[in-house]
Amino acid sequence: MATADRSREIIHLELGARSYDIHIKRGLLQDVGIELTRLRCSGKVGVVTDRNLAAHYLKPVARALKAAGYGVVPIVLPPGERTKTLRSIGTVMDALVEARFERSSTLLALGGGVIGDITGFAAAIYQRGIPFVQVPTSLVAQVDSSVGGKTGVDHPKGKNLIGAFNQPRGVLIDPATLRTLPEREWIAGLAEVIKYGVIEDEVFFEYLEQHMPPILTLSDAPVTQIVKRSCEIKARVVSEDEREADRRRILNFGHTIGHALESLGGYRGLIHGEAVAIGMVYEADLARHLGFCDQAVVTRLRTLIAAAGLPVRMPNVPFRALWDAMQQDKKVSAGTVYCVVPERIGSVRIVPLAKEETRAWYATIRTGTTGSRQRSSIRKQPR
Ligand SMILES: NC(=O)c1ccc[n+]([C@@H]2O[C@H](COP(=O)([O-])OP(=O)(O)OC[C@H]3O[C@@H](n4cnc5c(N)ncnc54)[C@H](O)[C@@H]3O)[C@@H](O)[C@H]2O)c1
Ligand SMILES: [Zn+2]
């Protein structure tokens, strides 16, 4: 699916009139002005970013945009999930009105998933929609959030409750930006990368098994390879089911338990990728318990996740609390909890979970009868 023009990988996301390309190239940030011209963006560019990213990249990005003739309006927000609010959308709207942005002006998201989600939603609603371009800088954003068009913000009662499907005009990925990403964020992003192997591609999973040491030291070739393959898989799944009616739900592998753990930690204990890592191990173990896969799948997955430096142990959470938190998840429809379970590495299916069966499985984990799993508290997660 990807085509390479020498050092550049291009992945096409086919969505009819909303189709676009994902470009992956080291040093692409320096060329962002030329890239926006190629994407037929005109007029002013609002660069939405956070303070961490601004310190590293705002100057070179602004310089590149100005050199290509764009008027640049930086909009710098505080970093972190707590910024993903309607209030930040208000801040962006104020800046756009103040700078007299028009329908033809462009927003550029320079940052992680938080900035991408905010910017995409702001672009969806300012004057009923203006173009936006994603320049993702975290691993999560490069392999997941910048691709697929889900945008939005959190509500005090839940994550991502307010938003819109809004596809960008293009996605520009410079893997070199990952070098300044904090290590914990980098490793957390690997959980989503591993997820793609499980849901779609055993060969990719094997690649990860074989290349984890150079990946962890951020070697150029394997990093570009994992970003590229992850984008290809996400692009294919999204192009088959843009609005998550069915197939796109396989991207939620690890997230039924993962989101529950995240919400039980009050969004503070585990970061998203870490919660998803634990979720993948235990959803696979649940799948084994229910007879969908064999123990080898669980063991292989747990081994790879641990090799990436991600946590693999369920924190000390009572079943009732976990089940209640799983009910809050958006994937619950009509009171039934659906879960993505592996049949083997590279193939998953979506199944409804029965509470009593899930409780029986959970009891085997808590007593340690299914293997080496032990109890640990949320704070003591090994990394
Ligand atoms: N839209 C989607 O489909 C989708 C998919 C997955 C996740 N998400 C959303 O994405 C968000 C998580 O994204 P995230 O993990 O990127 O979080 P984030 O945007 O908060 O970034 C994590 C931290 O890393 C910093 N950072 C990012 N890139 C950096 C770089 N290159 N150098 C130095 N620091 C850098 C940020 O400032 C931040 O402090 C969540 O809000 C989640 O809901 C959305
Ligand atoms: Zn995720």
Image (spheres, grey):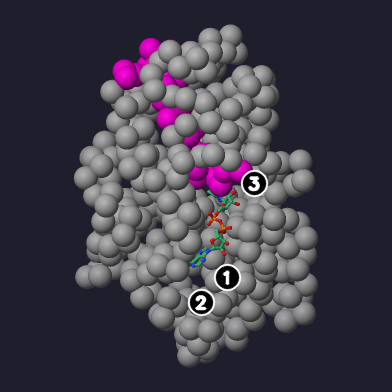
Q: Is residue 367 above or below residue 165?
A: above
Q: Which residues are magenta?
A: 268-295
Q: Report x, y in % for residue 357.
A: 53, 10
Q: How packed is label 3: few (under 14 Cα within 10 Å), some, or many (20 or more)?
A: few
Count of marks placed on residues: 3
Q: Secondary structure at mark 1?
A: helix
Residue positioned 63% across, 64% down in the render: 79
Classify residue 259 as left or right of residue 209: right
Q: Report if the beta carbon of the residue with label 2 is closer than 8 angstroms to ligand 1.
A: yes
Q: Which mark is residue 142?
A: none
Disc 1 under 8 Å from ligand 1? The reply is yes
Numbered tag placed on residue 52 in the rendering: 1
- Specify whether residue 235 is in view: no
- Decide which of tag 2 and tag 3 comes sooner along the chain: 2
**Residue 37: x, y in percent?**
46, 79
The residue to which callout 3 is attached is 268
Task: Residue 292: give x, y in percent of width and height.
Answer: 37, 16
Q: Are marks 1 and 2 in contact (CB under 8 Å)?
A: yes
Under mark 2, the amino acid is His
